[in-house]
Image (cartoon, rainbow, N blue to C red):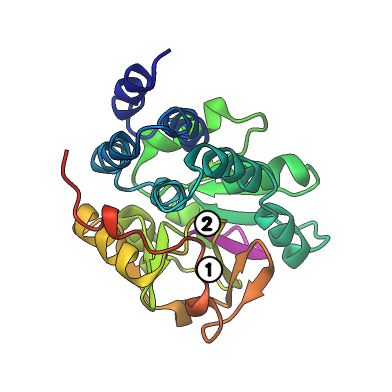
């Protein structure tokens, strides 16, 4: 498949379906533009216009668009995602337990945790996007119980895992449905922000991400959480805002296609 044909297929990717596969296709697509710098920037912009909510696409495009060898940077990004240790770090924080672990929704990092730690009783809470949750669990290699707000209140979990949409410029953003659910959650357990590789963006790129997504995701105070768990382990509200997963990419600050 030619790079532009693959690009058309990726930008038409159905919303809410398998972020991991979307990013993998984007990597293959961008690697094909290694000898076409103008085409590469255009491809990055088109990907971000059509999938602005996926922080890892911004991370990927920033790395590739600023690289001397874009193809090498694209495949290196895939290796980094494959080696992302966030799920393992979450498992270490939770430790050995017989109590359930509540997760607000289901994302690729939670899926990886489920596969790494089959001993954990992972319980997914509905956040208002039940169709997306159902699709994610159908595609999962390991199922999970699903509860609503009332069910979560009587669950007595050992921890609550909250997937990060994106962070940067001192802000933490969650998907709007997750942010609303977290506000109404009546559960007395440590709340951990799950921040995998590719979700902490530099200042200007994060600003572009915010502009592209409008009111969704929603901002949340980092002090809401007991800490943020990423590839290197736990960071607090002092150290996490310093994290940067991608370089600034001036070419991506104004998205046009």
Residue 137 to residue 214: above or below: above
Q: Residue at x 61, y 77 (%)?
A: 235
For residue 127, above or below residue 139: below
CA gap between label 2 and label 1 equals 7 Å
Compared with residue 132, is residue 247 higher up or lower down, i.e. above or below? below
Badge 1 element: loop
Residue 2, given in percent of the width and then of the height, sits at: 39, 15
**Earlier-in-chain disc, 2 versus 1:** 2
Determine contact: label 2, label 1, CB under 8 Å: yes
Residue bounds of the magenta highlight: 154-163
Is the residue marked by circle 2 packed among few (<14), some (14-19), or many (20+) residues within 10 Å? many
Side of 186 where 157 appears, left or right? right
* Rendered location of residue 161, percent (x, y): 57, 60
Front residue (pair 255, 52): 255
Up/down of 93 relative to 134, above or below: below
Q: Look at 30% across and 42% down and name the residue there.
A: 41
Please give the name of the residue rendered at 47% of the width and 82% of the height, measured from the top-left corner.
Answer: 223
Which residue is the extreme one toward the bottom? 238
Quarter that holds the N terminus: top left
Q: Which residue is mark 2?
A: 152
Between residues 146 and 65, which one lies in front from this camera angle? 65
Where is residue 186 drawn, in percent x and y? 47, 69
Any mark on residue 187, and which? Answer: 1
Q: Position of residue 9 (x, y in %)?
A: 34, 20
In this image, 129 relative to 227: left or right? left
């Amino acid at each position: 498949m030619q790079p532009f044909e693959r690009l058309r297929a990726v930008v038409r990717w159905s919303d809410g379906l398998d972020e991991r596969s979307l990013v993998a296709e984007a990597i293959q697509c961008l690697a094909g533009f290694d000898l076409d710098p103008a085409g590469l920037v255009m491809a990055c912009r088109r990907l971000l216009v059509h999938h602005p909510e996926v922080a890892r696409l911004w991370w990927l495009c920033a790395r590739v668009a600023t690289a001397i060898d874009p193809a090498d940077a694209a495949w290196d990004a895939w290796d980094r995602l494959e080696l992302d240790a966030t799920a393992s770090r979450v498992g270490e924080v939770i430790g050995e337990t017989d109590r359930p672990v509540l997760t607000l929704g289901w994302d690729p990092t939670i899926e990886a945790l489920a596969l790494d730690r089959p001993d954990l009783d992972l319980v997914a809470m509905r956040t208002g996007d039940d169709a997306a949750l159902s699709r994610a669990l159908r595609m999962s290699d390991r199922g999970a119980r699903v509860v609503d707000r009332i069910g979560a209140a009587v669950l007595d979990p050992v921890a609550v895992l909250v997937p990060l949409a994106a962070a940067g410029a001192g802000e933490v953003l969650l998907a709007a449905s997750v942010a609303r659910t977290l506000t109404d959650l009546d559960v007395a357990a440590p709340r951990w922000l799950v921040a995998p590789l590719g979700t902490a963006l530099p200042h200007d790129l994060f600003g572009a991400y915010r502009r592209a997504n409008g009111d969704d995701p929603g901002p949340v105070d980092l002090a809401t959480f007991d800490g943020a768990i990423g590839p290197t382990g736990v960071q607090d509200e002092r150290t996490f805002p310093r994290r940067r997963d991608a370089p600034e990419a001036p070419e991506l600050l104004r998205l046009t296609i």
